[in-house]
Amino acid sequence: MQKIHNNRAWWLVLPVFLLVAFSALIPLMTVVNYSVQDIFGPGQAFFVGTEWFKEVLGDERLQDSLIRQFMFSGAVLLIQIPLGIGVALMMPKSGIKGSLCLILIAIPLLIPWNVVGTIWQVFARGDIGLFGWGLNELGFDYNYTGNTVDAWLTVLLMDVWHWTPLVALLCYSGLRAIPEAFYQAAEIDRASKWAVFRYIQLPRLKSVLIIAVLLRFMDSFMIYTEPFVLTGGGPGSSTTFLSQTLTTMAIGQFDLGRASAFSLIYFLIVLLISWLFFTAITQDDKEK
Amino acid sequence: MIDWMNWTPTVVIFFAVIASILAVMTVYEIVSPCRERKGFLPIETTRGDRLFISLLSTAYIHLTFLAVSDVSLWVALAVSVAWAAVLLRWG
Amino acid sequence: MKQSRFKNVGITLFIAFVLTPVYWLLNMSFKTNQEILGGLTLFPRTFTLDNYAVIFSDPSWYNGYLNSMTYVAMNVVITLLVALPAAYAFSRYKFLGDKHLFFWLLSNRMAPPAVFLLPFFQLYSSIGLFDTHIAVALAHCLFTVPLAVWILEGFMKGVPREYDEMAFIDGYSFPRFFIKVFLPMIRSGIGVTAFFTFMFSWVELLLARTLTSVDAQPIGAIMTRTIGASGIDWGVLSAAGALTIIPGILVIWFVRNHVAKGFALGRV
């Protein structure tokens, strides 16, 4: 659809702009202020310039949690996106069965995040949780509070359980938006299942997949509540992701300057990756 | 009322500069609207896109200088401004 | 058909995977603490409703649910009110800085919450909104509004502009056209948007906990109370957790047909 150029449309956007600017810009400015000062308490702050940034860039603990974060977000996307598409393709197309599937699958999305952590904390325990107990009975030496690999896998499994439904839900809706005529045409051409998926379904899923990937990337990159409740970041610091490192720093040690400096770097990283992704996709679309 | 924001003169200047860049570019855009074009960047960009790219790369240039050298950040700023000018003109 | 049997098995397996942890939570909520800690039982031996009774008889417990529902409802209303006109503008017009404005909206989801909590707390304290429902609702708008604009824009793009023009020729004013003609046409979109807004606001805890202390405390924060001197009260904790799922199920029940009708999103 050809859009009309009209700057008066700003009046329609203004409420959104003001509302979001209020909650976004003021805290952002404050964090920038924190990041150039050493703050001991109200009214006791010293200007330190870019000291925090310099220190933070060479801080190994932060670098480690950044690497862990990238590994985690990468794994999350690699598992959840294909699995979500698969689930959406398998869901019944309509009727009572379709609705029922939809509701059941959406359940993990609707559970508050700390409850998600609690559910898995219990579920994965070797003594009172079905999952941990089952694995131990099967002869695996599974213990998520003691073993690094187990802890990692548990956090990952929890996230897959929690968020794959979002990808599935979005894809399911995207699939339902494809007109029946497309499939009929494919049938006349005797297109294979794969061809139908590759040339009809996948291109049509693009818009929902973009938002699924962006949401999953941004949210997994700042995951906090669930692993905090599940493992508390342990064993050691193996599941301490960025947000948790930052929270410990900002609130636990009241090291506001350092934590703010790193938050800003972290924000720049997410901004750059999201922008690259967003531009690449929209550009690709324009060329067609 | 705004004591808790811990304002420092440097940050005030920083945000004032950003805000005035945005304001100037907005006025410029109203006076002479620009079209998308292809420069040396791999994508077609408008003036606003190039501004965004310059601002983002400015941030990264400064961080790189901080991370790998002890050179004064004024050098980083000079590099960034030069890069932004190139980007806005030919990007 | 072999194909459809494969699909049925696959979807059944996935649903089993989704439901097993939830079942475990329900299972625990009907057990006594002795039974929970005494060993593994696949279903409650001594079925009890005591855990739920604790929650429904104590105002400080059930007020948590009411608080959460209040700010979530406020958030959904505010989000829809501001996002509807904005999405209309994005779907119909080009205007100065539209692309950048949209990306900026989206970028607000990217800020790590941990460090931004303190400024948020101070901001809402300084304007006297600390520990009110509206504070949480406004703060949640930060991430619900961009998503709402995105989803709504997709639906609005599906409505040809001829409808707008016809209505204006017929003498409709813009507000009247918008409410009487346009909104009914994108009913599904509003339903789906309300669902996603509800979802992200209902499950968020960090901001909600930071901005409240007593009067507007969300249920998630109250749940941490079950960790007492004698360890965690698993039974009550499970019951409280199980109850947090119910509002969500109700909401998805109402919008299931809208989601199943399908949607493609805007912006691309």
Image: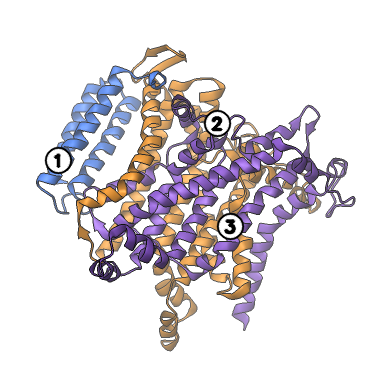
Chain colours: A orange, B blue, C purple
User: Mark 3 or mark 2: which comes first in sequence?
Assistant: 2
Task: Kindly identify which chain the residue marked by label 2 belongs to.
Answer: C
Q: Nearer the viewer, residue A118 or C76?
A: C76
Mark 1 burial class by Cα count in 10 Å: few <14, some 14-19, many 20+: few
Distance of mark 1 from mark 3, alpha carbons?
46 Å
Residue C63 higher or lower than A213, as above or below: above
Distance of mark 2 from mark 1, alpha carbons?
41 Å
Residue A7 percent location from the top left of the image: 20, 51
Locate the N terminus of chain C by quadrant.
bottom right
For badge 1, the amino acid type reads Val
Marks 1 and 3: which is nearer the front?
A: 3
In the drawing, what numbered circle is on residue C131?
2
Task: Kindly identify which chain the residue marked by label 1 belongs to.
Answer: B
In the drawing, what numbered circle is on residue B27?
1
Residue B56: image quadrant is: top left
Residue A21 percent location from the top left of the image: 35, 38
Marks 2 and 1: which is nearer the front?
A: 2
Q: Which residue is mark 3?
A: C251
For badge 3, the amino acid type reads Val
